[in-house]
Image (spheres, rainbow, N blue to C red):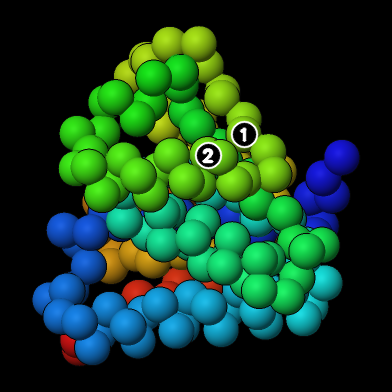
Amino acid sequence: MMNREKTVCFSGHRPERFPNYRQIEFETLLKMLDRRINEAIDEGFTHFICGMQKGWDTLAGEAVLSIRDDCMPQITLELAIPFKGHADKLNLTADDKARYDRLVSEADKVSVLSAHFYKAAYHYRDIYMIDNSSYLIYYWDGGPGGTSRAVAYAQEQGIRKKNLYMTGW
């Protein structure tokens, strides 16, 4: 059973909202994400929840798997999939689908939160992740959308938050 006090969740933008999306900046973002996850592990966090959207969520899930597989077998990854058939709604490229399927096959736990799609499914997925975590690592540029609602909810719940968005890229 997971321990909320030792759990981190992720929220962030899809790839098109990453600023400029130049390779060097993307590599810097991945290094920051990897460093932040390792710092969380050093602080005693052992369980990570990923929401399975393209972009930030996928990067975070892959980073956790990489760290787990390299040297930290005690680290666990949970996928919070908002509804059955979620991947079919994402309009994934073949590469994105392979990444999605890899995360599903290698995760320690897969939580499908609804049997079907409904309008608020993503919002309730975010609530599930935050209600089961004590730390949110996110990538948010300050604009409207799901990440802004997740950050606001995390603030209401009083959980620790860290935004890895870098201005000026």
Who's the residue at 17% across and 74% down the image? 21
Q: Nearer the viewer, residue 122 or 30?
A: 30
Q: Position of residue 116 (x, y in %)?
A: 43, 11
Q: Position of residue 74 (x, y in %)?
A: 82, 62
The circle drawn on residue 104 is: 2
Q: Position of residue 98 (x, y in %)?
A: 35, 44
Q: Secondary structure at mark 2?
A: helix
Q: Position of residue 92 (x, y in %)?
A: 23, 39
Q: Is residue 118 left or right of residue 161?
A: left
Who's the residue at 79% across and 50% down the image? 4
Mark 2 touching mark 1, by CB under 8 A? Answer: yes
Q: Nearer the viewer, residue 90 or 121?
A: 90
Res. 91 image quadrant: top left
Q: Is residue 120 visible?
A: no
Q: Quadrant of the C terminus?
A: bottom left
- Badge 2 density bin: few <14, some 14–19, many ≥20, Cα 10 Å: some
